[in-house]
Image: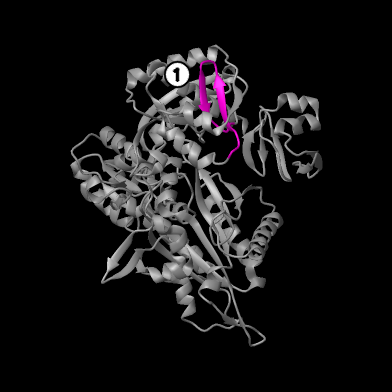
Amino acid sequence: MSSVTVTLPDGSTLEVASGATVEDVAHEIGPGLGRDTVAGKIDHELVAKEEPISEDCEIEIVTDQSDEYLDVLRHTAAHVLAQAIRRHHPDAKLTIGPYTDEGFYYDIANVELDADDLDEIQAEAASIIADDLDVERVEYDRADAREHYADNEFKREILDAEAAGDGPVSFYTQGDFEDLCKGPHVDSTGEIGGFEVLETSAAYWRGDEERETLTRVYGTAFPTESDLQEYLARREEAKERDHRKLGREMDLFSIPDVTGPGLPLYHPNGKTVLRELSEYVRGLNSEMGYDEVETPHLFRTELWKQSGHYDNYVDDMFLLDVNDEEYGLKPMNCPGHATIFNEGSWSYRDLPVRYFEDGKVYRKEQRGELSGLSRVWAFTIDDGHVFARADQIEAEVRRLMDTITEVLDTFDLDYEVALATRPEKSVGSDDIWEQSERQLREVLDQQGVDYDVEPGDGAFYGPKIDFGFEDALGRSWDGPTVQLDFNMPDRFELEYTGSDNDAHQPVMIHRALYGSYERFFMVLIEHYNGRFPTWLAPEQVRILPVTDDNLGYAHRVKNELGDYRVEVEDRDWTVGKKIQQAHDDNVPYMLVVGDDEEDADAVSVRDRHEREGKGVDLAAFRAHLDSEVDGKRTEPDFLD
C-alpha cells in the first residue's frame, strides 16, 4: 500500500497510508487526540475528520479547543436550522447553509417566512438540540444523490458543479434529516449550547442578480448559552453604534435610492471628517517623499487589458461604449500611476519614485452585498505607489509598516496583520511569487510582527500584507495594505537606467494607509460611537449664550476661536436644553456664556463627558484646544 507524508504544525512529519483520514492521522499522533478530533485542516483548508488524504500535505487537527471549533459547531447549527425549517415547511427547498464570522445562514426556496415563523423555527431547533441527535456522515454514489434531489434543482446544480466524477458524494444525517454536505460537523446536535434565529432577508441564488430570489435565514450558535447571551448583548450595543444609524442622526452621509445603490452622498458634516482624514495622510505622504498625482475616472479598456485588470476584474467593472470604443470606470488607480512613471526617463539615482492620490474607483459589487459604507460601488482609496529598485524593497516596506502602525495608533484602533499569498487566479511566474512572498515574510519577521498567513488571499498581481480591524459587530474588514508587484512593471515595460547603464525593471509597491476612505470612515463612526476626537469632529465647539443679551459676546468668543469649527446656539431655549442638544450632537466642547462670563472675559467649559469648569480664561482654553487638536488626541481632555 502506498503512503503519503503529512507535515504537522511543529514541522515534524508522519508517514501514513494513502487514503487514511484526518481522524486516522490524529490517532497515529496519539489516542487521546484521536478521540478529541472534531475536524482537520489540510493545507490550511478546514475539512471533515473523515476526509481522506491522498497526497503529501500539511495537516492540523481541530479539537473543541481550536479556534476553528466554532466554525464547525455553527456548520452543524445551520443543519439544525434547515431541519427545523423543513419540519414546519416540508415543501421548502434547501440550497446552501455555510457558517460565517458571526454565525451561519441557510438559503431556502419555495417558502416565505415572517416573525411568527421564526419563533416556531427557534422552538423546533431547541427541540432538535435537546434531542442530542448523532451527526453522521454517509456517502451515496452520484446517481443516487441526484435521484434523492429529483425535486430540488439547486442541490442538483451543486452536485453537477462540485461533485463531478464517478466518486461518492457525502451527506450528513441527524435524526430524520439529511443534507448534501462536505462537512465538517460536530458529533451531535447536543454540543450546541446556545442557538438563536436572528433574522431573514432576500438573497440571489449563487449571488447572481439574474438568478432566483431566495429566503435567507440568519442565525448564530455558541458552545454555551452564556456565550450566546454575551454575543446578543454586544449585538444590541452594535445596533446603537451602526454607522448607518449614526450617519443619519449626525447627518454624515446618505445613499438614496434615486441616486443608485452603493453610491454614497457625503453631507457637509461627513465631508468635514473626510477632509480632515485626507489632510492627515497628505501630511504623512509629504513626510515620506510622495508626490501627489491625479488620474481620470475612466480609461480606454486597452489600459485595463495591458495591466491585467480586464481579464481579472471585467465582471466587476462598469463598461461604457464611447464612439465605438470601450471605456471602463477605473477599479484601480495603479495603471494610471504606472503610465505616469512610464512617461518619464529615470536613473537608478532617481529611485524610489513615489506617487499618491486620493483616487475614486468603481467596482460593481452584487447589490445584495452592498451595505452602508462597508460595501459600495464608488469609493476613494488613499492610494500610493512606489517604483523602486530591488535593493530598496525592504526599507520601503519597513517604513510603510511603521507609518501604517502610526496611523492606526493615532485612531486607537485594534488591528491584526496577515500575509496574503498567491491566489488561484493570478499572473506571473512561480519564481516571482516565491521571491515576493519571501521578501514580505522577512520584513514581518524582522519587525517582530505577529501575523497570520492567509493562503490564496493575495492580489492577482502579487502578495500583500493586510491590516484588518473589526466593526461594532465584530466583523473583520480589510484596511491598510502593502503589496509587492513584479508583474505590472513587466506588462507596462517600466524601466530605469542602472549604474551599469543598462535598462532595468523596477518593482512596484502598492500601499494604502487607510484602505478606502468609505470603509475606514465606517469603522471610525462605530469605533467612536459618533463621538469623534476633537480634531475630527464636524463641530468642535458650540457656544451656548444664557440669554439673548449674551449673543453679542457669544459671537465675539466665536471670532476668537475662528480657526476652529464653532457654532453659536441662538435658539430660544433654556441653557439646560441647549446643553442636552449639544450633548446629543456629540459636540466635544460646550462654552456657556452669561453675564458673569462676559464681565470676566471668560467662559464656562463643559465637555461631552458632562465635566464642567467655570470662569475659564478664553486664551487658556484656546491654547489647550491648539494642543489637543495638533496632538490628535482621542478624547476631550481640557477638564481632566
Question: Residue 130 at x, y = what percent?
Answer: 54, 12
| Residue that lies at the very extreme toward the bottom in this rendered image | 501
In terms of depth relative to the viewer, which is nearer, 538 or 601? 538
Q: How many marks?
A: 1
As drawn, 67 above or below 192: below
Residue type of the residue flagged with mark 1: Ala
Q: Secondary structure at mark 1?
A: helix
Q: Position of residue 184 (x, y in %)?
A: 60, 31
In the visual, does 108 lie left or right of 191? left
- Residue 610 visible in image: no
The image quarter containing residue 141 is top right
Q: How has the structure been colored for display?
A: one colour
Instruction: Give the vertical position of 460 relative to 469 (above or below).
Output: below
Seen in the image, is 356 located left or right of residue 17? left
User: For residue 182: magenta?
Assistant: yes
* Residue drawn at the location 63% of the way across and 67% of the way down: 393
For the question of whether residue 440 can be seen, the reply is yes
For label 1, the residue is: 84
Q: Position of residue 205 (x, y in %)?
A: 39, 38
Is 443 in front, or is 506?
506
Residue appearing at x 50%, y 25% in the figure: 79
- Residue toward you, 547 or 241: 241
Q: Nearer the viewer, residue 604 or 506?
A: 506
Quadrant in which the N terminus appears: top right
Magenta segment: does it hold 433? no
Residue drawn at 48 percent across, 37 percent down: 158
Residue 551, given in percent of the width and then of the height, sits at 21, 47
For the point 60% across and 25% down, the residue is 138
In the image, residue 422 sits, relative to residue 5, either above or below, namely below
Which range is magenta?
Answer: 166-183
